[in-house]
Image (cartoon, rainbow, N blue to C red):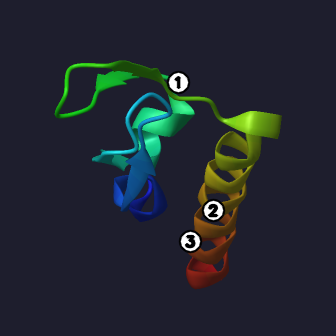
Amino acid sequence: MSQLLKARIDVACPSCGRTVRVSLNDVKQERIVHCPSGHAIQLRDEGDGLRRADRALDDFKRKLKRLGRR
């Protein structure tokens, strides 16, 4: 898992507006989390943006390693 996916963001509960702190990996995995009031929140990675960004970072890291070997 890249450092990007370890980052945490606040998500507002659609039912009550209270916030929940989740990792970007939670969003990527589309997990269900609960707000402090107990409402279930289904996280969504709309358009697979996080999945694509994570793959691009992994690819970039591999390319940097290959450059270091030359």
Residue, x 39% and y 63% (percent of image)? 3
- State whether residue 18 is above or below residue 4: above
Q: Is residue 47 left or right of residue 15?
A: right
> Badge 1 local density, few (<14 within 10 Å), some, or many (20+)?
some
Q: For the residues labelled 1 and 3, say whether their Cβ atoms are less than 8 Å apart.
A: no
First along the sequence among labels 1 and 3: 1
- Nearer the observer, 22 or 35: 35
Residue, x 50% and y 33% (percent of image)? 14
> Badge 3 local density, few (<14 within 10 Å), some, or many (20+)?
few
- Nearer the observer, 52 or 39: 39
Type of amino acid under label 1: Glu
SS class, disc 1: loop
Specify the quadrant of the image occupied by residue 40. top left
Residue at label 3? 65
- Nearer the observer, 45 or 70: 45
Type of amino acid under label 2: Leu
First along the sequence among labels 1 and 2: 1
Q: Quadrant of the C terminus?
A: bottom right
Q: Which disc is residue 3 wearing?
A: none
SS class, disc 3: helix
- State whether residue 19 is above or below residue 9: above
Residue, x 34% and y 55% (percent of image)? 6
- State whether residue 64 is above or below residue 60: below
SS class, disc 2: helix
The percent coordinates of residue 12 (x first, y second) are 43, 46
Instruction: Measure the C-alpha gap from mark 1 to mark 3.
Output: 31 Å
Instruction: Measure the C-alpha gap from mark 1 to mark 2.
Output: 20 Å
The percent coordinates of residue 8 (x first, y second) are 34, 58
Residue, x 50% and y 37% (percent of image)? 27
Q: Is residue 45 left or right of residue 11?
A: right
The percent coordinates of residue 22 (x first, y second) are 33, 45
Residue at label 1? 30
